[in-house]
Image (tube, rainbow, N blue to C red):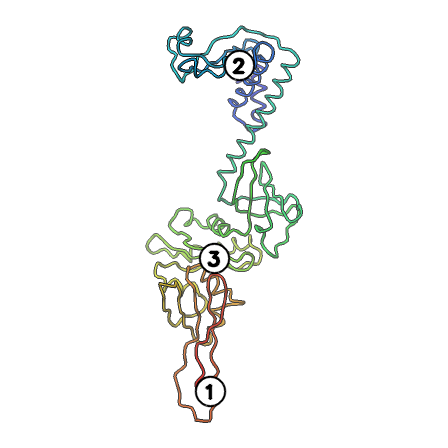
């Protein structure tokens, strides 16, 4: 219960602004100290107020001095004392400490002092709100939040995420997704910056960890840590591959993420428009991992070159296009997921005797996938 109507007003203000009562009290004390210095003190003095919660007119005022070693260190006489002077006032004084002296009480302040106090209160409350908001959303950095598209400003989207608006920049927007005012979506908080106007929150729909966060919300095994997402490769709005691993014997990590009748993965897909998701089993064996990553294509053999971090992968003739994928997407995502440059080649057919006049076979062409681009390489050379 409030000690007085004044304290009740401070508690109401604190509740409305979402601030601790102690912060509001400190703000009022700073304002009263500023008003006292304006009317009864001197510029440069450090005035400290101790609010009387029952009667504001009985607020105690004190002048604060910093204690320095000798006169050579004195820079501001209104706020510094030498140790010898401080010991005359307080026996416990020491260098680096403070000496606090009471000041005469004054219950009335002039108009200018009152305006000063008002400005201090407004400024301190605004600073406290900005600090609270910054800390609140800094704690959400790297997490998923729900938000509503507030408005479209040029190429940027303004997103309401609760107590403030966030910004979604063009490179954080999924190609082919159309955003409109009032649209409710989930976002990944990729950054929180402190500015003079308050915290600036940046959200994303393209960040790979958006997928990780959405699955974590839907899959209890991910929340408990018995299943983990080890790697993600994403082309926003098109396709994503994730590799998952289990840390409990007998647990199927892929099945856990898919859910019964695909209910869990469908819940994630509902947040991603037309994006497709491939869930594969993680392995510390690069050959096994690469084979899994090229799913749904079937692999004949994989040869690794550790020096160039390249894997040469043979697949059956009818699996080449499936392994490469549309526009090279499947092998490109597999390369990003595994960290290997993948070279897809057709499985060589057994050699057969040809008549002398039979034309030489055309060279077979396959695709090489690196992390950055797709190139072509000859798997066979023409014979003379």
Q: Nearer the viewer, residue 57 or 182?
A: 57
The answer to whether residue 331 shows anywhere in this view is: yes
Q: Which mark is residue 318?
A: none
Q: Position of residue 162 (x, y in %)?
A: 58, 38
Q: Position of residue 252 (x, y in %)?
A: 38, 57
| Residue at (48% x, 63% y) in the render | 332
Which residue has dot 1 on it?
360
**Left or right of 224 on screen, residue 193:** right
Q: Nearer the viewer, residue 69 or 301?
A: 69
Q: Name the secondary structure under disc 1.
A: loop
| Residue at (52% x, 18% y) in the render | 1
- Furthest residue toward front: 72
Please identify, in this view, whether the residue under mark 3 or under mark 2 is nearer the observer. Answer: 2
**Left or right of 229 on screen, residue 34:** right
**Left or right of 329 on screen, residue 85:** left
Query: In the rendered image of this protein, does residue 63 appear above or below residue 141?
Result: above
Q: Name the secondary structure under disc 3.
A: strand
Q: Quadrant of the C terminus?
A: bottom left
Query: In the rendered image of this protein, does residue 62 appear above or below residue 183?
Result: above
Q: Position of residue 220 (x, y in %)?
A: 43, 48
Which residue has dot 3 on it?
233
Which residue has dot 2 on it?
45
């Amino acid at each position: 219960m409030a000690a007085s109507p004044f304290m009740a007003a401070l508690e109401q203000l604190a509740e409305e602004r979402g601030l601790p009562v102690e912060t509001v009290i400190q703000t009022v004390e700073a304002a009263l100290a500023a008003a006292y210095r304006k009317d009864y003190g001197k510029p440069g003095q450090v005035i400290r107020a101790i609010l009387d919660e029952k009667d504001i007119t009985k607020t105690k005022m004190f002048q604060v001095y910093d204690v320095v070693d000798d006169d050579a260190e004195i820079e501001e006489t209104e706020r510094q004392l030498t140790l010898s002077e401080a010991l005359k006032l307080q026996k416990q004084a020491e260098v680096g400490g403070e000496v606090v002296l009471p000041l005469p009480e004054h219950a009335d302040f002039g108009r200018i002092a009152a305006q000063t106090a008002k400005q201090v209160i407004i400024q301190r409350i605004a600073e406290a709100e900005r600090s609270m908001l910054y800390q609140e959303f800094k704690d959400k950095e790297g997490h998923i939040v729900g938000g509503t598209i507030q408005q479209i400003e040029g190429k940027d989207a303004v997103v309401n995420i609760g107590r403030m608006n966030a910004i979604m920049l063009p490179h954080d927007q999924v190609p082919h997704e159309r955003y409109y005012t009032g649209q409710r979506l989930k976002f990944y908080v990729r950054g929180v910056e402190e500015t003079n106007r308050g915290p600036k929150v940046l959200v994303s729909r393209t960040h790979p960890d958006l997928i990780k966060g959405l699955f974590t919300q839907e899959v209890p095994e991910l929340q408990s840590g018995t299943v983990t997402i080890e790697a993600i490769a994403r082309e926003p709005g098109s396709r994503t591959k994730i590799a998952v691993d289990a840390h409990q014997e007998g647990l199927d990590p892929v099945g856990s993420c898919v859910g019964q009748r695909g209910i869990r993965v469908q819940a994630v897909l509902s947040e991603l428009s037309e994006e497709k998701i491939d869930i594969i089993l993680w392995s510390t064996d690069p050959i096994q991992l690469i084979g899994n990553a090229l799913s749904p294509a079937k692999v004949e053999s994989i040869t690794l070159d550790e020096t160039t971090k390249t894997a040469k992968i043979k697949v059956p003739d009818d699996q080449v296009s499936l392994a490469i994928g549309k526009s090279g997407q499947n092998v490109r995502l597999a390369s990003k997921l595994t960290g290997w440059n993948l070279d897809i080649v057709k499985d060589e057919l057994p050699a057969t005797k040809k008549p002398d006049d039979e034309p030489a076979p055309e060279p077979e062409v396959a695709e090489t996938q690196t992390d950055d681009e797709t190139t072509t390489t000859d798997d066979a050379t023409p014979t003379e």
